[in-house]
Every structure is written in C-alpha cells, then in structure tokens.
Image (cartoon, rainbow, N blue to C red):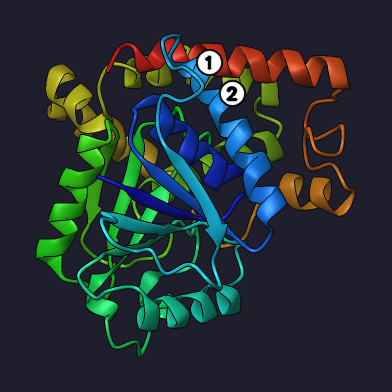
Amino acid sequence: MKVIVIGSGIMGTGIVAGLIAQRIPAVMLGRDAARCSGAITNARQIASRLAADVGADASPVESGLIDTWNAWEGASIVIENVAEDLALKQALFRDLDARVPAHIPIGSNSSSFPISKIAAGLATRRRMFGAHYFMPAEIVPLVEVVLGADSDPVMGRGLCELFAAMKKKPVLVKKDITGFLANRMQHALLREALSLIDAGIASPEDVDLAVRYSFGFRFAAVGPIMQKEISGWDTTLRAGTEIYPTLSNTATVPACLVNNVAQGKIGMKSGEGFLKWTPETINAAKAEYERKLKAAFELL
C-alpha cells in the first residue's frame, strides 16, 4: 500500500501523520518543496505522539512537486487536500485525470464541494470520490467515501476496505448530497444549539455541558440508532411527537453566530468567539482536546 497526499496544509499533514503512525508508505505533493519538507517533519512529530514506538524512520515518506510528479506506480489512492476553492480543485482534477493511471482512485477531502462538481466532465470520473476526513485527521477515525453521480460503486466499496486497512472507520455515502453524512447531522445539532443560545434558553457553556454529559457521553460508546435500539423506539416516537414540532427549522444561520462573525469573533483564531481566549488558554485547551480524543479512540 502507498498513499499519495496532495497538499501540505493542516489536513494533508494530519493524514500523513496518521499514515506514518500506521507505518504506511506515503508521498506528499505540493507547490513548494520547502513547505512539503517542513510538513513531513511536523507529521513525523505528530506521529511520534500518536504511537510511542514510532521512530523517525518508521514509515517512508517521499515529497515532490505536483506539477512534475509522475511516479504513480504502486499508489493505492491519491487524496487531494488543497484549499477549499472549487475552481482550484476542478483544475487540479483535470490535471490528475490526464496524468494519473486510470486504475488508481482519486479522492477529494473537500468538506463542502460535491465530487460530482469537482469531477464534472472528466474522462475518468468513475474513479473519483469524496474522501472526507475530519480534523484532526491523524486522530479522528471517520472517513466519508462519497459516491458522485458517475462514481463506480464497486470501486467505492473497495475504497472503504482500503481505509479500513489504514485503521480508519469508513462510511459509504451513496448519494452526493450537500454536507455528506456526518456534517449534515452535525449542523442539525448546531442549528438547534445556536437557536437555543439565540433565544436565551441556555448559555454556550451550558449547551456544551448538556451535549458532553448526556447523549454525547453515550455517543462515545454507540451511535444514535444503536442507542435507541437499546432504549426503545416506542419511547423515541412518543418523545419525538412532542419535541419535533418545536425544533428549529430555520433556513438561515442563527443571529448569534452571524453577529459574532461580523464582529470578528471567530474563536481561538481571533482570541474570542462565544468564549475569550489567550495564547495560554488556547494551548491548554488544544492539549486537553487532543488528550481526550486519544482516550476516546481507545474505546473503539
């Protein structure tokens, strides 16, 4: 197995780090050789934190320039991680369509653009898929394999097997819908959470506590369908009959989020979101977040 990762940003670095931790050969391609080299160094450091027995040379990682790379032999998949810009991704996929041998699947780690749009009109679009990781990619297990309008379903199932061999948890999304699978459910929760904050029903801190220590706590063990198999769908039907009519179904983003972003309050990156941040509290929160994610990973 060999995985070719295009892009040396946060997601590309995280994917390569996860591959190193699993001792899977990888290639990182980018536009800047120095940046790729630095990203690989960072990926090795991340991998060493993931697995104590991962040494500096645990997994071979090559780097190269995307415009000139032609050593596709032996590649199991090519995964694109460039900036979230549709025109940029379309141009890259046109180039890959012509240069990458047609038997090698190509995935896009886009979190918003459907693979059907990215690969539209390309000769080999049957081997192109969404391959959506979640940040931090080196820890969060899920990868969404998304079938575009022309993607080969058999090859899609094969990709799920490939990601499982990488110790990820793949899901096959059978239709190329907006938000794929996990983000649709995540944003349904966020819409309700932000609407409750907007209405003054709960503080942002209490919303987080309510999620973490009730159904979020249970979701570390099982998903929502299995949990209701345990507790009983009859109860869910009765509760849903009362609750569903009162849930937010707004088609616009709640005002509290719109107003915060308009004021530059976008979270840790600006020093304030719903909460206020300093460099010290940011570092502490990120370290605690990573520690808890690793602990949760052990439950899988």
Q: Quadrant of the C terminus?
A: top left
Reply above or below: 63 against 104: above
Image position of 235 (left or right of 216): left
Cα distance between the residues tagged 1 and 2? 7 Å
Residue 222 image-quadrant placement: top left
Mark 2: few/some/many CA within 10 Å (<14, 14-19, 20+): some
- Three-letter amino acid code at the position of disc 1: Arg
- The image position of residue 265, as x and y in percent, is 84, 41
Reply above or below: 87 against 29: below
Residue 199 image-quadrant placement: top right
Which disc is residue 49 wearing?
1
Q: Residue at x 34, y 22 (%)?
A: 219
- The image position of residue 286, as x and y in percent, is 67, 20
Q: Residue at x 38, y 20 (%)?
A: 215
Which disc is residue 45 wearing?
2
- For this rendering, which residue is in front, 130 or 58? 58
Asked which secondary structure carries label 2, the reply is helix
- Residue 9 visible here: no
- The image position of residue 157, as x and y in percent, is 13, 54
- For this rendering, which residue is in front, 276 or 6? 6
- The image position of residue 8, as x and y in percent, is 60, 50
- Three-letter amino acid code at the position of disc 2: Gln
Asked which secondary structure carries label 1, the reply is helix
Query: Tags 1 and 2 in contact by the CB under 8 Å rule?
Result: yes
